[in-house]
Amino acid sequence: MRRTTSVLLSLSALLAASALTVPTAVAAPEADRPAAVPAGWEAVDATALARITGEKDARRAPLAAGDATAAAEPELLAVQSVSNNRFVATEKNYAEPNTGVQRARSTEFGGSWESYAFEWDETTETYALRSLANNRYVAVEKNYTGSAQNVLRARSTSAGGWERFVLYYNETLDRWALQSTLNGLFVTTENSYTGSLQYALRARSAEVSGSWEQFVLYDIGA
């Protein structure tokens, strides 16, 4: 089993570095902190991720037995929900309108369905998440209604306002949170849902109030 490290890497940082980098939180100025972000959570940018290395303990991502395709490139990340300890996957076989919906449903990291590239944009100071399952960017479906409103789907061929997120890190908890720039809300794992949208990810929380809005990131590079 490969040794993997809890880390966040941007594609731009990876292109400039030949070795894995290990992230730490970037202290955002207090004036820049949204009111919904509690103390201890700081925005993370690509500059700090490339600069600070080797400060976090190694963490192993459980690979599927016999899997030989995972961890092909160091820029790939797996996302695990703290609320149910499951890895986020892209449901690329779902029928419309839920094709590519994001769900924290995998008990182990199995390959491309649980793999994401976090791409940093310097202009907006945000990240776009590209699913390796279908090579589409994750969007917030603001125009959906009912229980599916603001659900996350990997369905976009380019990254615009619907596909932009601010990433926060809590060093004490060693946990991460994602905030959609489209509606200003944090991504949540819907543990109480049933059926095909059970454990779906939705940008619907006004604050990071607990484990439902918290995630662990794993570097699945070699």
Image (spheres, helix red, strand yellow):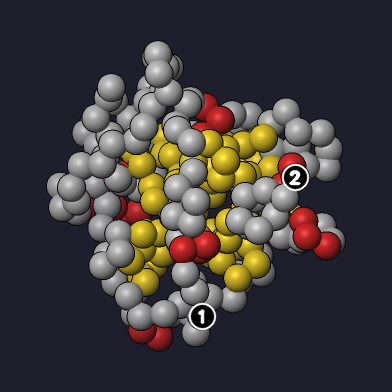
Question: Against 115, is 191 above or below?
Answer: below
Q: Position of residue 178 (x, y in %)?
A: 50, 60
Tally of marks:
2
Q: In which quarter of the image is residue 98?
A: top right
Looking at the rendered structure, the kind of residue marked 2 is Gly
Say which quadrant the C terminus sits in. top left
Q: Quadrant of residue 187?
A: bottom right
Task: Kindly identify the residue that appears in the image at 36 percent across and 32 percent down.
Answer: 62
Question: Against 115, is 144 above or below?
Answer: below
Q: Which of marks 1 and 2 is in front?
A: 2
**Residue 186 visible in the snapshot:** yes
Badge 1: how crowded within 10 Å, few (<14), some, or many (20+)?
some
Q: How far apart are marks 1 and 2 (CA)?
A: 30 Å
Q: Where is residue 204 in the image (x, y as percent from the top left)?
A: 65, 67
What residue is disc 1 on? Answer: 36
Badge 2: how crowded within 10 Å, few (<14), some, or many (20+)?
few
Question: Against 32, is 6 above or below?
Answer: above
Task: Kindly identify the residue that appears in the image at 58 percent across and 61 percent down.
Answer: 188
Given residues 121 and 138, the one toward you in this image is 138
Q: Position of residue 173 (x, y in %)?
A: 30, 64
Looking at the rendered structure, the kind of residue marked 1 is Ala
Task: Kindly identify the residue that appears in the image at 56 percent across and 45 percent down.
Answer: 104
Q: In this view, does 207 lie to the left or right of 51?
A: right
**Residue 44 visible in the snapshot:** no
Q: Is residue 129 left or right of residue 65?
A: right
What residue is disc 2 on? Answer: 195
Say which quadrant the N terminus sits in. top left
Task: Kindly identify the residue that appears in the image at 70 percent across and 55 percent down.
Answer: 193
Element at label 2: helix
